[in-house]
Amino acid sequence: MGTVFPSIQSFYSREVPSSSHDANTECTNIQKPGDGFTSSEVEAALNPLSRSWKPSRHYEPCPIALLQAGPNNYEISGRIVNFSVNFREQGFHFIVLTDSSGALAVKLYYMKISDYSLILGKRATVWATYISDATTAGSALIPFCASATTIYPGRNGATHLIVHDDVPGSEADSILRSPLEFNRAEYSYLPALMTLKSFLSTGYDMGEGKILVCVRSVGPRRTVRSKKRQCDLDMIDVGVFDDTATSVLKLWEDKVPSAKGWIPNQTILLISKPTCRASGASSELGIGHNSMIDVDPEFPDADWLRSKVKSMSKKQSVYIPFPTDDWDIEAAIHGPGRTLFTIADVEDQVRHPELMIDFTGKLNVIIIEMKLMEHWRKGSICCFECCGIPVYANKPVATCKNCGSQRELVLNPRIIGSMIDESGMITASKLVWCEDAWTQLFFEGVIRGPDLKDDPDANLIEQSWEDLTALDTNTLRDIEEQLLYARLTLTFGWSSKLERLCVLGVEW
């Protein structure tokens, strides 16, 4: 007897017919018909990008400058320097990638417009099967863009694009950051690179200029009514600067999310062929179709600007957070290893090139300048930095005018001018104070007075420096007069990371 093979129909579940008589009583026994596909297979067909993409053929890794026009299987890696979501409403994203050797224009057709999150500076990998000439693709005006390709992701398994979300500081995050025209072996300068001041004055007339700037501030997302398009557009203002000038970079619509990860005084931008538009007495920068933005590029000029911004931020910084975990404050104030320094001793030790270590000690100083009332009149007794912009107020809580968020402020160290001892002088505004030190300065020696320092009943109500902001003008003036020419003993800690003296405690 021959082997009996199952029929095709036996693999499918049948629908059990039900009459109208027992439809209400036996509806739970009805079996839904199957179609032979699992849920994962259905999901892969309806949403192809949800599954991991595996190349079905061999792709040759190739720099952009060496791409050859015609049918070839290439694996191309680069960073996004410009893009346009739903380019001119033609059903595809237009992306420009660079890898320090050249630029590639990519037409990315999508199934859903939200399938891809395009961010300036992100690393992307393209698997292409055909390379065309940029002149035929309408990308001839983009600098160093000689090639173009078209990607049809999803059901077409031959072409694909992945935007990588690299971990900051990782090896993958540090590659492909050299700008175009950068020759590492014989580098002297980057062609067409100019200062921001030169570009804003006359450089934008060249049409080929590059500027290297640092992000100063990132404003909130705003909605602006466009008279030309008769619609609402999202916009964000990004403050940028270098060592010569400051300006505002305006990002519109699809490029607004790119500024979310930019850090004031840290993120460096190399902008090629930016647009420039006069706005009153100042000029505003923008990003055009032919522009490029390299985020945190790696080349000597960018390294110089980073060091320059670091030194500028030290001089101009309004708020420096106190490093709470660097020292044992209780041991520094009351421990056995207490050393009395002079200002000259501290300067000699911190300027020694071989002794850049953290240490603690004590300084006996006299306050020779007070600016408490001056800052009260200016409304700047308390300060903070938000969005790269200083926030001042005469109370410990204020609202940032840039992003609208409420911030807790700290006491402005500039309310004390200068301190001296027998060896030198120190500018008190350069000191970083902890909150307890401010409380000990104002509430142990001045407001409580010397007669109450040893009174146990005086500590029943815990006081804070924030109580200073609730005092009236006459009381603040009395405090300023009492602190002027007062002798104090400061317990300090030197932070080699901040390169600042930090005040841990105050003794009268």
Image (spheres, rainbow, N blue to C red):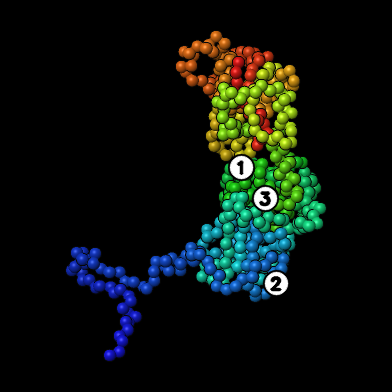
Q: Which image quadrant: the C terminus?
A: top right
Nearer the N terminus, badge 3 or badge 1? 1
Q: Residue at x 36, y 73 (%)?
A: 35
Amino acid of disc 2: Gln
User: Which residue is identified by label 3?
Assistant: 296
Circles 2 and 3, Cβ within 8 Å, touching? The answer is no
* Residue 305 locus on image (x, y percent): 73, 44
Specify the label residue 124 is tagged with: none
Q: Residue 68 bears which disc, if any?
A: 2
Residue sitting farthest toward the front: 336
The residue under label 1 is: 219
**Considering the numbered disc 2 on the image, is that residue within a helix, a strand or a loop?**
loop
Residue 118: x percent and y percent? 59, 56
What's the residue type where badge 3 is placed? Answer: Asp
Looking at the image, is mark 3 or mark 1 nearer the viewer? 3
Pointer 2 local density, CA inside 10 Å: few below 14, some 14–19, many at least 20: some
Q: Secondary structure at mark 3?
A: loop
Is residue 428 at least partly visible in the picture?
yes
Q: Amino acid at mark 1?
A: Gly
